[in-house]
Structure formats: structure tokens, C-alpha cells
Amino acid sequence: MTAYNIPQAITLGDNITELILEAQPLDGWPVEVFALKNLRILRIRHGGLKSVPADIGKLKNLDELDLSHNAITKLPAGIGKLDRLSVLHVSHNRLSSLPAALSRCLTLRELDISGNCFSRCPQVVLSAPWLARLRMAGNQLQKLPATLGDCTQLQELDLSQNALTTLPAAIGKLVKLRKLDLSHNNLRRLPAALSKLPWLEEIDVSDNPTLPQPIALLALPALKRLRGLTTPEKTDMLHELVDNCNRYKLPPAWRKLLWQWREGATAVDWLTLPAADLSKLLNLSWPELTVAIRAYLYELRPAQLAPGAVITPLGECLIRYHDIEARLQQQGIQWREKADKTTTHLLLGAAPIQLPVLKNRPYIFIGERELLKWLDRIEGRYLALDPPAEKLDMLRRLLMNGQRQQVLLAIQMIKGGGMPEEILPVLISVSNSCDDILIRDKLSQMTIPYMAENEKHTKPSPILSNVGKE
């Protein structure tokens, strides 16, 4: 049972397991507490306490002790007799040391000494390697001892709002650490070992004015949240990127390249990734990224087609070869189903499962839309080049009329004269609203290859479930 004041606690007696005295001014320690033999949780906060009696050790069943927000200057050695104590909160007091006897509390897992007057890490902390959560924020710490690395069970460590300028390399020994707050310090650098902690999920290095951009932290294997790499306005964007990387099980080493892209860097070299890895990125249902990579590949080398060129399709191409076979042959261009040493151009379709080896090969990437537009241009198809206004009006009327024969006539005109950009939105609209399956299929086959990359390749790839499982 829980009591919220001393009279209530006296009434309930041994039935009390939790006593909470919140913002109740006290002249001194309430001695009535020692009569509560079954007390497991004791919270006396904002009470104005200045001291804690040595008899605190009599509360043998105490599991959690919270004396935060008082005016305590010293803790008694008797606290070391609390054999079952697992949580001790003494934040926002006036402590500058902790009793050595606290190291006898072998069950202690959580210690909060934030907002006190510690100028160095208390020795008792270094003698308690079983601690899982340690909060020392808002003190006057300027450096940390290397022996902090011996606290190998730590999962959460809060060192924010101190005066730290460096961290010991031994922090890399905290292999179970999941959450680390280093914000509001004066750190000049971070130890390399920090970026290799295997389970570190959240790290905050914000408000360290002299700290270089900690881009290496993006390589943390279990990273979920990182504050301090970029401006607060861009932090949500960073977390979205990290979430996507985790969602698709992308290697942590890729995050630096992806962040360069996400921040708007113009010189992201996607070919630094092996072909197999680049293929994985192109297969994600992450439209912004896949469109950016495609644009990079298309711009890598001008897609100049000429007689003698050999095109190899990659992935699910929306262009059907038998529809353009004669047109390609007339221009002296060959088609190879598999890339070989004769291949000059790679036609990038949807879900390119396996890119050929790209390193040291001068492949030219081309999109389906560009290929069709090139054919229209080289063949001089008047509707694709400089369509007369009256012809465009006629096509619109035929398509919007809704009558089957007139729509089919418009399709034939476009097949013979080329695809006018001005008519493409009308074709897409009619295709989406048409009930005639035959016409809808014909319109889809015509329009989809001409659509922009961000409109075509936004569906999840059929191999998406395999990404990251190799």
C-alpha cells in the first residue's frame, strides 16, 4: 500500500510498502519512517531536508530511495546497510562526495547524482561495476578517470551539463551502453572507440561548441537517435534517415554517404559503393533516394547513342523489346539481354536485382524515357518534336471524348508521330479513369515508360524482403 503523508503512514503501519512525501516542508527527517518495517519505496522530494540520519540502514527492505530536490550536503555511511537497494536518486542536492560504504550495496543498479557539486567522478561509482544506469548531469566534472571503463554493466550514462573537454579512450569498454548524453560540455574531440560501441542506440553531443562534426558516430551499429551532428531543424531529418537505414537493414557504414545526400551534397559519389550494394539501394521503396541515385547514374556520362551501341536492360523494364526492336535495328543499335564486354549502355528499369561490375567499366546509364525520346527525335517524329497546336487539340478531343474508336485513333496517331509531352498528362488521366481494359492497357504501355523516374519507380521491389539478409 502507498501513503502520501506521515499520519496516513502511521495509520497503515506495516501494510505500507511505499511512502511518497512530495513538496511537504519538513523540519527534519521524519523518524516515524523507521517504524515502517515493510517499506520498499521511499520518496521524499522537495522537502527541504538538510541531512539523512545514520539509522537509514534500518530500512532493510528498501528497494528504492529518492531524496531528490532537497538541501542534503552529506549521506551517512549507514546507507551501505541497505542490502536490497537497487535505485538511489539524490539529484539536485548539495553533495560533493558519496560515502565509501555505498559500494557495499551490491544490488544497486541505478544511481542519480545530477545537479550537485561534484568536481570529480566519485570513487564509489568506480567501485560499483554492477551499475546499469548512472546520471551525473549538471555537476562540475572536467575530466573522467580511465577506470570508468571498468563499469562494464552500464547501459545508460548521463554526463550532460558539465565542463568536460575530453573523454577517456576507456569509454570504449562500456560495451553494453545503450544511451549516452554528452550534451552541454566543452568537448574538443571524441575517442574513436566511441563509434564502435555495439549496442549504443542514443547519443547526444549537442551544445559542445568546439567539437568538430561527429560524422563518425553515424557508423554506430545499433544507432537510433543522434543529436548534435546537425542543427536542431535537421535533426528530425537525420532520425528519419537512420530509421530508414535500420528498416532496410542497411550497413551502418553507408549512413555517412546517405547523410551527405540527405543534407543536399552535390558531389555524392554513389559509385564508391560496390555494384551489389548500389543495386540494393535502387531496390528500396525509398523514392527520394532511388530517384537521386538514378539521376546521378544518368548524369555520370552523357547518354549519347550512336550506331554500334549495345544496350542491356537491367531489372523490370517497362519498354518491351519487341515494340522497339525494328526501331533500334534501323539505327544500328543492338540489344543484349545480359551485360557482356560489348555492352555500352545500361537501360535502367525498375528493381535492377544485380548490376554488373561497374568499377573501371565506362558504362553509360540511360532511362527508358530518354531512350524513347531519343528514338522519336532521331526518327523525326513530328508530334514528339514540334507538334502543331491544332494536332494537339485534336488529340485532346479524341482522348477526352470517351468513345472507344476515337481513343484508339489517338493512340495510333501517337504511335506513328511520337509522344508529345503536352499530351502525356491527358493520357495518364484517361488511363486512370478508363473502364475499357484493352484501352487502359494500351494507354499504360504507352505512358509509363515516358513518365518521370519519381513517378515510375516508387513501388516496393519484389526483392525488398531479401535486402540486408545476405
Image: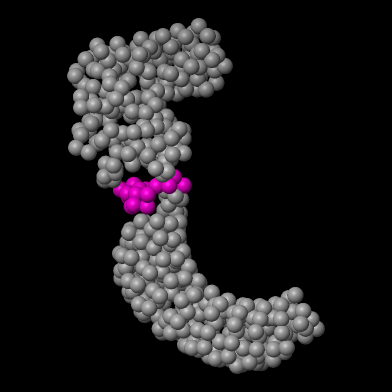
- The one nearer the camera, 27 or 419, is 27
**Relative to 342, 54 lies left or right:** right
Asked whether residue 462 is in view, the answer is yes
Magenta residues: mostly which secondary structure? helix
The x, y position of residue 450, in whole percent, is 38, 23
Relative to 175, residue 427 above or below? above
Which color scheme does this rendered protein use? one colour
Asked whether residue 264 is in view, the answer is no
The x, y position of residue 180, in whole percent, is 44, 67
Relative to 279, residue 383 above or below? above
Identify the magenta region. 247-266
Relative to 135, residue 103 above or below? below
- As for residue 135 lying within the magenta part, the answer is no
Residue located 27% across and 27% down the image = 339
Classify residue 434 by image quadrant. Answer: top right
* The N terminus, quarter of image: bottom right
- As for residue 260 lying within the magenta part, the answer is yes
Residue located 28% across and 21% down the image = 336
Classify residue 341 by image quadrant. Answer: top left
